[in-house]
Image (tube, rainbow, N blue to C red):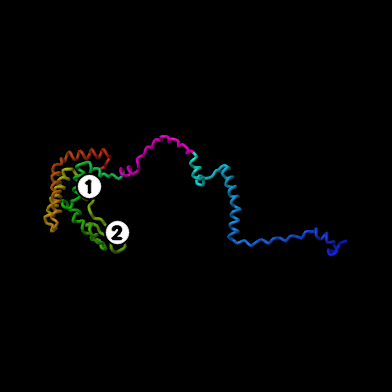
Amino acid sequence: MATDPDDLPIAQLKKKPSPKKKATPAKVKPAQAKKAKKEKEEPARAKRAVRAKKAPLPESDSDDEPLSAMKKKPLPKSKPAADKKSPVKKPSSSAKTIQRCVTNSSTMYNETNKGKLVQHILCRWWYAMSWPARECLTYNEPGYDPVDAFPGVFIAVSGSDIGHIVDRRNKKDMPCFDVMIKKSSSDLKDLLLDAIDGQKEAMKESTSVDSTEFEVVKKDLDTLQVWCKNVIADKADREAETIAKKHNLKL
């Protein structure tokens, strides 16, 4: 049966301790709380550092390792490279290209006196010969006009053949290598000497005031004239035949 606390004897009431009140925590300032938290974490950090020292280093990339660890590792010895023979270079295709570009005219110009005679004639042929012939300079077909700088060549300017070109020049007498090289060296010498004389006469009639340049050209012509006279025609012909056979040239 439950008893009212007021009916209990005084002796029993003294024995019962009064319940303790919980102390209310004092308010801690933020700065003090942060300091206390830091003091609690320091021992834990120290313990972790000790364990890290005792534990073996994990394998990692060399870029992540400390310098002290990298110094302890011995560098791998490099093996001596085996002597490799450098591959033999094959001749480039440019050499073949240059060989193909050699022409009949360049070979004769460089290796024979007959070729040199032809070369010097083609530089001044208009002083020694007239080409094309006068009968080739006219064309009576209606609708055709002469082409400037190409005497003997005509072009249609009207009608159904407009744009059509007619070349009336005689190809057999054309001043070119293929025609000149077929002449004898004796004939080539005569042509060249005539061309040199004709060029000198043209220089006398010129009204140019650049006398210095004319003097240089005149000296070159004198030198060329002496060389031409000294060329032995028969020997030059034989030399040209020998070189043509050597290089399989069809002249």
Name the side, left or right, on which 55 lies relative to 190.
Answer: right
Residue extending farthest to the right is: 1
Dot 2 alpha-carbon crowd within 10 angstroms: few under 14, some 14 to 19, many 20 or more = few
Name the side, left or right, on which 211 lies relative to 168.
Answer: left
Q: Residue at x 72, y 61 (%)?
A: 21
Q: Secondary structure at mark 1?
A: helix
Q: Are marks 1 and 2 in contact (CB under 8 Å)?
A: no
Residue 46, position in %: x, y?
A: 58, 48
Q: Residue at x 17, y 53 (%)?
A: 126
Residue 250, position in %: x, y?
A: 26, 42
Q: Which residues are magenta?
A: 74-99
Q: Which mark is residue 28?
A: none
Residue 66, position in %: x, y?
A: 50, 45
Comparing 215 with 148, the one in front is: 215
Label count reads: 2
Q: Which mark is residue 164?
A: 2
Mark 1 and mark 2 lie on one chain; the one further toward the N terminus is 2
The Cα atoms of the two marked residues, 1 and 2, are separated by: 27 Å
Q: Amino acid at mark 2?
A: His
Q: Amino acid at mark 1?
A: Val
Q: Is residue 95 magenta?
A: yes
Comparing 39 with 229, the one in front is: 39
- The quadrant the C terminus occupies is top left
Residue extending farthest to the front is: 11
Dot 1 alpha-carbon crowd within 10 angstroms: few under 14, some 14 to 19, many 20 or more = some
Using the rendered view, name the quadrant where residue 249 is placed: top left
Comparing 143 with 221, the one in front is: 221
Q: Which residue is mark 1?
A: 179
Using the rendered view, name the quadrant where residue 141 is placed: bottom left
Residue 29, position in %: x, y?
A: 60, 62
Q: Main secondary structure of the magenta part?
A: loop
